[in-house]
Amino acid sequence: MPVSVTRTTITTTTTSSSSTIVGSPRALTQPLGLLRLLQLISTCVAFSLVASVGAWTGPMGNWSMFTWCFCFAVTFIILIVELGGLQARFPLSWRNFPITYACYAALFCLSASIIYPTTYVQFMSHGRSRDHAIAATTFSCIACLAYATEVAWTRARPGEITGYMATVPGLLKVFETFVACVIFAFISDPHIYQREPALEWCVAVYAICFILAAVAILLNLGDCTNMLPIPFPSFLSGLAFLSVLMYATAIVLWPLYQFDERYGGLSRRSRDVGCTYRHPHSVCGWDRRLAVSILTGVNLLAYVFDLVYSARLVFVKV
């Protein structure tokens, strides 16, 4: 059942007969407030269970712990702002910030719910630490569902006037930057791409497109879109078109130079010495290359959809 979100903590003085409660505790009793309480509790329980037994050693464990702590902290800040009626004093656009964060948090918790058990928990011996880690994974999944539900509830509906980040193109921008961040994590070892200029170009593609999408997000969070010399929909269409072209080259060059032996690649996982033995809490080089190839295709599709939606906005404006 769709849930209507009411901004009960923003003061409005349009008429003398209508007013909005500022900083009301009733914000926590609304469906969205209860959902944010669930997010707060689930992330808190997740990192508390892991911290109590020290089950977060290594890069994958550190990433999961950072995800839960970060999501807990920002959700707590959002609840304080809602309860105190401080939206007008918040440095970022409150029309765009909560849903932008909720989308990022859903993706972050999803990644932790997948990475933590597959690269960390399964290598743990049976006992109290493993039980705590499994329970933390469960609460991470709950947090992911809670954040995804908030995005579904608060996203823009057809004909509704709201912030850009609540629209499909805005949410796609969040997804694109998140996927790029995951790609950066997989190519953190320079040896994966430094041997060929074509692979270095792919890394440049990931970085440039990430920066462009991040700029679009920051312009909306800071309410700075009017400062652009061209209309914002045209700006978005140009960014999406450029990103599609650049990712189209990466989707060809990256697999070609990583997996074709004629170009120095490794066609099979067994040919990578580092993948012969599975090392706990790490991902071998061949798996990293494969993951980047898949994520490149995923982001290319996201940019294609982004281009379609952005182009529609331009035509609507015209």
Image: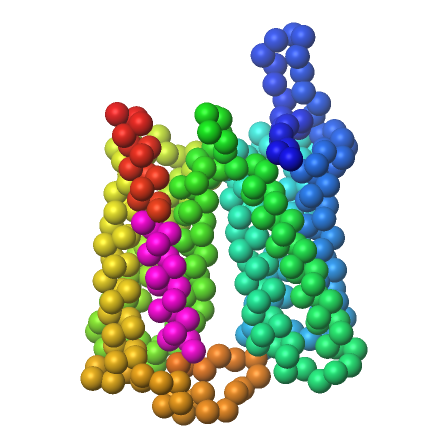
Along the viewing direction, whichever of 220 and 294 lies nearer the viewer: 294
**Residue 22: x %, y % from top left:** 69, 25
The residue drawn where x is 35% and y is 63% is 296
State the quadrant of the N terminus: top right
The residue drawn where x is 35% and y is 30% is 226
Question: Which residue occupies the extreme top position in the image?
Answer: 16
**Residue 143: x %, y % from top left:** 66, 54
Q: Is residue 298 magenta?
A: yes
Q: Is residue 31 left or right of residue 273?
A: right
Q: Residue 267 is drawn in which quadrant?
A: bottom left
**Residue 20: x %, y % from top left:** 67, 20
Q: Main secondary structure of the magenta part?
A: helix
Along the viewing direction, whichever of 286 and 226 lies nearer the viewer: 286
Q: Residue 31 is drawn in which quadrant?
A: top right
- Residue 212 visible (yes or no): no
Q: Is residue 134 left or right of residue 256?
A: right
Q: Is residue 193 magenta?
A: no
What residue range appears in magenta?
287-304
Q: Is residue 10 left or right of residue 290?
A: right
